Image: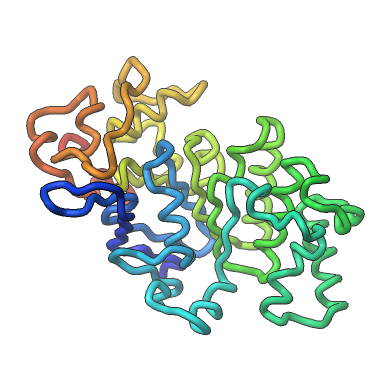
Amino acid sequence: MSLLEIEGMVKYYPAGGFTCGRRQVVRAVDGVNLAVAPGEVLGLVGESGCGKSTLGRLAVGLEEPTAGCVRFLGREISSRSGKELRAARRHFQIIFQDPTASLDPRWPVGSLIAEPLLNYRVGTKADRARRVGELMELVGLEPLHAGSYPHELSGGQRQRVSIARALALNPSLIVCDEPVSSLDVSIRAQILNLLRDLKESMGLAYLFISHDLAAVSYLSDRVAVMYLGKIVEVIRTGQLLKDARHPYTRTLLAAVPGASPGRGLPPAPLAGDPPDPRNPPAGCRFHPRCPEAAEVCRRKEPTLAAIAEEHQVACHFGG
């Protein structure tokens, strides 16, 4: 059984203006199916604005879907509210991109990490204090940091606080929403190594969201590539360099320093900007920027289909 299942997920946001008498909507997520197995890291990669962060928030119930459902260990959570959703939420957590925005500046580190324990009435005050100390040690924070405020810490230390807080209730799944993109390169590597070590030692599963394919490849077992609200390819990380089929995936790979992917990558970086999500193009949404587009790509939308074991692609010429 999958730990997390996302089925037929759709999320539209109202947008200003009307088209043909209908109110415009931003199609942030538009029919996504994904699953994460226990202990697996599924990387979700794509350009800014493709809908990957929205999908992460939908996965943990921070957004209500327009359509579709989320199941955790086989039980639907997207339709729950109140006590039922609260009970389920202790088993999955989220780490946000910017710890400066996600950590309350009025609270010291010890209180921030203890907050989930207090919210769920876990243990006594002494138990919570011990747990906070354990979590701080686990993520590489010093005991003296317990009394510090977020603004007194470095960016890497603040993200370690966010990780410790996410671990407080011993979740099975953590959604990591661009957890290293706001950090310096050297600190980024430290946080990625920490996440990998925690995954191995605690048996965690991650939905790891990033625009950085190199970071996703380093941490993930499988990679899902997202473009303009849709998944265009899902592939084992070990097969990514030699077997990627979608032109968008191969273009992302071409931008990774040191990568040597096969199958004739496009020689130039991806041209142009993504289309307006309020008015996505007909057919394949990638065709206006695709160096391999043909007439069928402009007319008919490709479906995400299996072409090999654990490899799916949405491309008319990807098989």
Against 189, residue 176 (above or below) is: below
Q: Position of residue 189 (x, y in %)?
A: 67, 36
Against 213, residue 110 (above or below) is: below
Against 277, residue 258 (above or below) is: above
Which residue is painted at 15% across and 44% down in the image? 301
Q: Is residue 265 visible?
A: no
Q: Position of residue 259 (x, y in %)?
A: 47, 24
Outermost residue toward the top in this view: 267
Q: Looking at the picture, tell me which residue is in the foreground, 15 or 184.
A: 15
Q: Locate residue 218: give its quadrant.
A: top right
Q: Position of residue 243 (x, y in %)?
A: 33, 35
Against 153, residue 207 (above or below) is: below
Which residue is painted at 50% across and 35% down in the image? 212
On the rendered structure, is 217 left or right of 25?
right
- Please identify the quadrant where the N terminus is shown: bottom left
Q: Is residue 33 visible?
A: yes
On the rendered structure, is 46 left or right of 190?
left
Which residue is painted at 82% across and 57% down in the image? 137
Q: Locate residue 284: give its quadrant.
A: top left
**Badge count:** 0
Q: Looking at the picture, tell me which residue is in the foreground, 49 or 249.
A: 49
Which residue is painted at 28% across and 65% down in the image? 67
Q: Looking at the picture, tell me which residue is in the foreground, 111 or 2.
A: 111
Q: Position of residue 125 (x, y in %)?
A: 84, 79
- Please identify the quadrant where the C terminus is shown: top left
Q: Looking at the picture, tell me which residue is in the foreground, 313 or 95.
A: 95
Colour scheme of the picture:
rainbow
On the rendered structure, is 250 left or right of 48?
left
